[in-house]
Image (spheres, grey):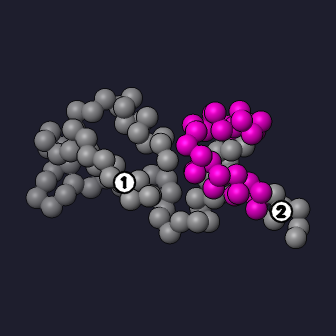
Protein backbone atom coordinates (compact mmCIF):
# COMPACT_ATOMS: atom_id res chain seq x y z
CA UNK A 1 0.00 0.00 0.00
CA UNK A 2 1.36 3.44 -0.90
CA UNK A 3 2.14 5.97 1.80
CA UNK A 4 -0.73 8.34 0.81
CA UNK A 5 -3.21 5.44 0.75
CA UNK A 6 -2.01 4.27 4.14
CA UNK A 7 -2.37 7.79 5.58
CA UNK A 8 -5.89 8.07 4.14
CA UNK A 9 -6.86 4.73 5.65
CA UNK A 10 -5.49 5.79 9.05
CA UNK A 11 -7.26 9.15 8.97
CA UNK A 12 -10.57 7.66 7.83
CA UNK A 13 -10.30 5.21 10.71
CA UNK A 14 -9.89 8.17 13.09
CA UNK A 15 -12.94 9.89 11.57
CA UNK A 16 -15.04 6.76 12.11
CA UNK A 17 -13.72 6.51 15.68
CA UNK A 18 -14.68 10.16 16.28
CA UNK A 19 -18.23 9.53 15.05
CA UNK A 20 -18.67 6.76 17.63
CA UNK A 21 -16.85 8.24 20.61
CA UNK A 22 -19.16 11.17 21.43
CA UNK A 23 -16.55 13.91 21.97
CA UNK A 24 -16.47 17.34 20.37
CA UNK A 25 -14.02 17.77 17.49
CA UNK A 26 -11.72 19.90 19.61
CA UNK A 27 -11.72 17.44 22.53
CA UNK A 28 -11.14 14.53 20.16
CA UNK A 29 -8.24 16.31 18.45
CA UNK A 30 -6.68 17.15 21.81
CA UNK A 31 -7.09 13.52 22.88
CA UNK A 32 -5.39 12.31 19.68
CA UNK A 33 -2.83 15.16 19.70
CA UNK A 34 -3.97 16.25 16.22
CA UNK A 35 -4.43 19.74 14.75
CA UNK A 36 -8.11 20.62 14.37
CA UNK A 37 -7.48 21.93 10.83
CA UNK A 38 -6.01 18.58 9.83
CA UNK A 39 -9.04 16.82 11.29
CA UNK A 40 -11.44 19.05 9.32
CA UNK A 41 -9.49 18.39 6.12
CA UNK A 42 -9.74 14.63 6.52
CA UNK A 43 -13.35 14.77 7.70
CA UNK A 44 -14.28 16.59 4.48
CA UNK A 45 -12.36 14.01 2.41
CA UNK A 46 -14.19 11.25 4.27
CA UNK A 47 -17.58 12.84 3.58
CA UNK A 48 -16.79 13.26 -0.10
CA UNK A 49 -15.92 9.59 -0.50
CA UNK A 50 -18.51 8.01 1.77
CA UNK A 51 -21.69 9.85 0.87
CA UNK A 52 -23.99 10.14 -2.09
CA UNK A 53 -25.35 13.33 -0.53
CA UNK A 54 -23.64 16.44 -1.88
CA UNK A 55 -21.69 18.34 0.75
CA UNK A 56 -21.68 22.12 0.83
CA UNK A 57 -24.23 24.78 0.08
CA UNK A 58 -27.67 23.98 -1.25
CA UNK A 59 -30.32 26.16 -2.85
CA UNK A 60 -33.18 27.06 -0.53
CA UNK A 61 -36.56 26.81 -2.18
CA UNK A 62 -40.01 27.34 -0.71
CA UNK A 63 -42.34 24.42 -0.22
CA UNK A 64 -45.39 23.94 -2.42
CA UNK A 65 -47.79 26.84 -2.00
CA UNK A 66 -45.31 28.91 -0.01
CA UNK A 67 -43.17 31.94 -0.76
CA UNK A 68 -39.55 32.16 0.37
CA UNK A 69 -40.31 35.56 1.92
CA UNK A 70 -43.35 34.31 3.86
CA UNK A 71 -42.65 35.16 7.50
CA UNK A 72 -44.43 32.00 8.64
CA UNK A 73 -42.32 29.69 6.50
CA UNK A 74 -40.10 27.65 8.83
CA UNK A 75 -36.43 27.01 8.20
CA UNK A 76 -35.76 23.31 7.72
CA UNK A 77 -32.25 21.93 8.11
CA UNK A 78 -31.73 18.44 6.68
CA UNK A 79 -28.48 16.81 7.82
CA UNK A 80 -26.73 14.11 5.75
CA UNK A 81 -27.53 11.49 8.41
CA UNK A 82 -31.27 12.06 7.89
CA UNK A 83 -31.92 14.24 10.94
CA UNK A 84 -34.21 17.14 10.13
CA UNK A 85 -34.69 20.32 12.18
CA UNK A 86 -37.58 22.71 11.68
CA UNK A 87 -36.94 26.21 13.05
CA UNK A 88 -39.01 29.39 13.10
CA UNK A 89 -38.18 31.81 10.29
CA UNK A 90 -36.98 34.37 12.85
CA UNK A 91 -34.24 32.11 14.20
CA UNK A 92 -31.09 34.20 14.87
CA UNK A 93 -28.29 33.79 12.35
CA UNK A 94 -25.85 32.84 15.12
CA UNK A 95 -28.06 29.89 16.02
CA UNK A 96 -28.27 28.85 12.36
CA UNK A 97 -24.47 29.04 11.99
CA UNK A 98 -24.03 26.83 15.04
CA UNK A 99 -26.54 24.29 13.76
CA UNK A 100 -25.00 24.28 10.28
CA UNK A 101 -21.56 23.57 11.71
CA UNK A 102 -22.79 20.38 13.42
CA UNK A 103 -22.24 17.05 11.79
Q: Please say if 22 is above or below 90.
A: below
Q: Residue furthest left?
A: 65
Disc 2 secondary structure class: helix
Start-end of magenta stretch: 8-37
Residue 58 in sight from this viewpoint: no
Q: Please say if 52 is above or below 66.
A: below
Q: Which residue does the numbered mark 1 point to in the structure image?
A: 83
The x, y position of residue 35, in whole percent, is: 74, 36
Residue 48 in sight from this viewpoint: yes
Report the residue at 58% width, 39% height from top.
23
Spatial distance from mark 1 to mark 2, Cα to Cα? Answer: 32 Å
Within the magenta stretch, is there residue 9? yes
Q: Please say if 14 is above or below 95.
A: below
| Quadrant that contains the N terminus | bottom right
3 sits left or right of 10 in the view: right
Q: Which residue does the numbered mark 2 point to in the structure image?
A: 6
Front residue of 4 and 27: 27
The x, y position of residue 55, in whole percent, is: 50, 57
Within the magenta stretch, is there residue 26? yes
Report the residue at 65% width, 52% height from top.
17
> Are discs 1 and 2 less than 8 Å apart at CB?
no
Q: Earlier in the sequence, mark 1 or mark 2?
A: 2
Q: Main secondary structure of the magenta part?
A: helix
Within 10 Å of disc 1 (Cα), the crowding (few <14, some 14-19, many 20+) is few
Q: Quadrant of residue 74?
A: top left
Report the residue at 77% width, 57% height from top.
10
Amino acid sequence: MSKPAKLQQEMFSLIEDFQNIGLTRIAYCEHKNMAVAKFYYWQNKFREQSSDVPYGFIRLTPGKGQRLTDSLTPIVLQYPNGVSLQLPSGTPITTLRTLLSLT
